[in-house]
Image: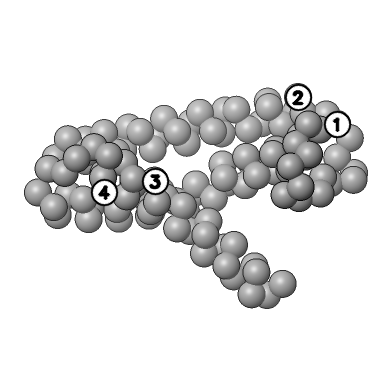
Amino acid sequence: MRKWLAVGAGVNLLLGVPGVVPVWLVWYWASNWPLAGLGWTQGEPTENDGMLPWFMVATPVLVLFGLAWWLVNRPVRRRAEVSGRLYWSVGAAATFVPTGALFAVSALHG
């Protein structure tokens, strides 16, 4: 039923609130990676500990969040009578809504 797609979107929207932390960790890691001369950001000049502490902190957080996200979505996906591609796309997009809202607010307040 399509109502389960709405339930999945709501669940993923709620999961996106604590999901701000893993997204921030990935962004911080990508912006400070020594080989990331992609021009997106400038690395933090005081970040001189190397990347090992970030791998030690970020890996468990990312794994736990990814596992929780998958375990919560799996039963809802089974009930949703829509294609898997549609369900997972809506779920991922809804998860990033709180992070996008924080980006928008921070851009407005400069």
Label 2 amino acid? Leu
> Sequence-wise, which precedes: disc 3 or disc 1?
1
Badge nearest the viewer, 3 or 4: 3
Q: Residue at x 47, y 36 (%)?
A: 65
- Mark 3: give few (<14), some (14-19) or many (20+) Cα within 10 Å: some
Label 3 amino acid? Ala
> Sequence-wise, which precedes: disc 3 or disc 4?
4
Q: Nearer the viewer, residue 104 or 20?
A: 104
SS at mark 2 in the image: helix
> Sequence-wise, which precedes: disc 3 or disc 2?
2
Q: Residue at x 84, y 46 (%)?
A: 44
Q: CA distance from mark 2 to mark 1?
A: 8 Å
The disc at residue 92 is: 3
In the displayed structure, would residue 108 be above or below residue 11? below
Q: Residue at x 45, y 33 (%)?
A: 66
Name the outermost residue toward the front: 38
- Mark 4: give few (<14), some (14-19) or many (20+) Cα within 10 Å: many
Label 1 amino acid? Asp
Tag 2–tag 1 contact (CB < 8 Å): yes
Residue 83 at x, y = what percent? 19, 40
The disc at residue 36 is: none
In the displayed structure, would residue 26 be above or below residue 13? above
Residue 90 at x, y = what percent? 32, 50
- Mark 2: give few (<14), some (14-19) or many (20+) Cα within 10 Å: few
Q: Which residue is mark 2?
A: 52
SS at mark 4 in the image: helix
Q: CA distance from mark 3 to mark 4?
A: 10 Å
Q: Which residue is mark 1?
A: 49
